[in-house]
Amino acid sequence: MVTTTESTLYPPTNDRWLSRGFIWLAMLLVSFAGSRVIVGQEVAVSDEELLAQIPTEFSLEPGSAEEIAELESRFNQTIEKLKELLAEARQAEIRFRFGQWEESDRWNEQWEKSQYYGKFVRRELERSAYYLLFKSAQPDQRVLDLCQISVGPLFDEFQYEMVFRIANEMMRRIPDDEGVRRMRARAAILTNRFAEAQQELELMQQYFSELPPFELDNFKKLPQFVDQWQLEQEIRNAEAVADDLPRVELLTSDGRIVIELFEDQYPETVGNFIHLVEQGFYNKVLFHRVAKNFLPLSMAQAGSASFTPGPTQGTFEGAPNYLDYTIYDETSRGPQRRHWRGVVSMMKRYSPEGEPVPNSAGSDFIIVLAPAPLLDDELVPFGRVISDLEVIDRIRVNIEIDTKEGKEGPAENPDFTLIFKTTVIRKRDREYQPNKVQ
């Protein structure tokens, strides 16, 4: 039995569109599907219930007439609700400014409540618009306008996969909109869609002065990325034909992640990872080091911080799971694999000077959230995510990196994604064991 509290674990939710900042608001306002935590109280939740609440994937298939009608009705109702809240906020502001002094606290509280509720309703409105964009053959102009406005904030929330999908769909509706084309190109280069990014390179060159340094660097390296990605695609196509690489499933509080392992190139590293999975080592383990604000090192790290069930509440403990051994660095036994988005790599210790310590990998692994060529000569990329990559965008941020000095610190509102359970889906007929450093 796992017990959660507000301070330890955000509950899984079947609504992928709500950012973590609104999940608690939803629990305060409504009886929200999948939410089992009451703010300020501890509620016991079984492992089975947690696993059952893992978010499901969003379908991009066109909807039926009944489904679209229901979505349009919800969209219109949400607009009316937002109008009501805005009117309440305006009234409260007027009463606060011009009313009696003794009632000012009351109206200030009313204004704050309307703003607070309004954020939740606005996100619900955005969610309805996204659904209609994909489901409806002819979405309302208001839907297109709202999607166009909200895609920028989604990018700032590091939701690169969803940004590309929305911008790509928007281009079918308004193909000449430069803002949509630019956002699509920015998301494309961060989601391994280098051909799509190259289509807009001429347009993007006009806005290079507005791009953050590392995004600009990525666009300048785009021809190199295209060539390297073509080689990677050839390797992946050959692997798909053979269809015999080991796979591991991670069930997390933010969704299901399936990893295919590069056993042909890194059999010893894969052997260690599968051994740990089969031992249950990664069950109830956190993604304890997740940074997204620094593109060259945008990653999610897990393997040495766990969630420990207790008699009254669960607790998070840092680094209780370090192994009593490390494994040897492994050189590829075939074509070099690079750190593309979605690649899984073994993490090493780093010296005070920032250099990776040889043969220091053990249990910690990272999932690369954006192409990271800086890691190609430092870490061993031993697998890749083959399930919906939108899930890795939802892994919760808890670290921020100073982009000038490269120093790490806790995020403003740190949060954690929990790995409930890991399972080997398939493997080859051999023994998987770590090759320990002697």
Image: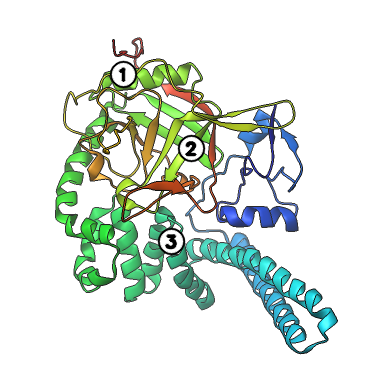
In the rendered image, residue 403, in percent from the top left (x then y), is placed at 33, 55
Q: Which residue is mark 1?
A: 327
In the rendered image, residue 83, in percent from the top left (x then y), is placed at 68, 78
Secondary structure beneath label 3: helix
* Separation of marks 2 and 3 at Cα, in angstroms: 21 Å
Front residue of 352/155: it is: 352
Q: Quadrant of residue 329?
A: top left
| Res 136 visible | yes
Is the Cβ of the residue at disc 1 closer than 8 Å to that at disc 2? no
In the rendered image, residue 350, in percent from the top left (x then y), is placed at 31, 33
Secondary structure beneath label 2: strand
Q: Quadrant of residue 427?
A: top left
Amino acid type assigned to the residue bearing label 2 in the image: His
Left or right: 1 in relation to 262: right
Which of the colour schemes (rainbow, by chain, secondary structure, one colour) is used? rainbow
Q: Which residue is mark 3?
A: 156
Alpha-carbon neighbours of circle 1 within 10 Å: few (<14), some, or many (≥20)? many
In the rendered image, residue 279, in percent from the top left (x then y), is placed at 48, 16
Query: Looking at the figure, which quarter contains the N terminus?
Result: top right
Secondary structure beneath label 1: loop
Amino acid type assigned to the residue bearing label 3 in the image: Asp
Residue at left offset 23%, top offset 69%:
208
Q: Quadrant of residue 387?
A: top left
* Separation of marks 1 and 3 at Cα, in angstroms: 37 Å
Q: Earlier in the sequence, mark 1 or mark 2?
A: 2
Left or right: 417 in relation to 189: right
Q: Which residue is mark 2?
A: 288
In the rendered structure, find residue 301 and report the number of the disc placed on it.
Answer: none
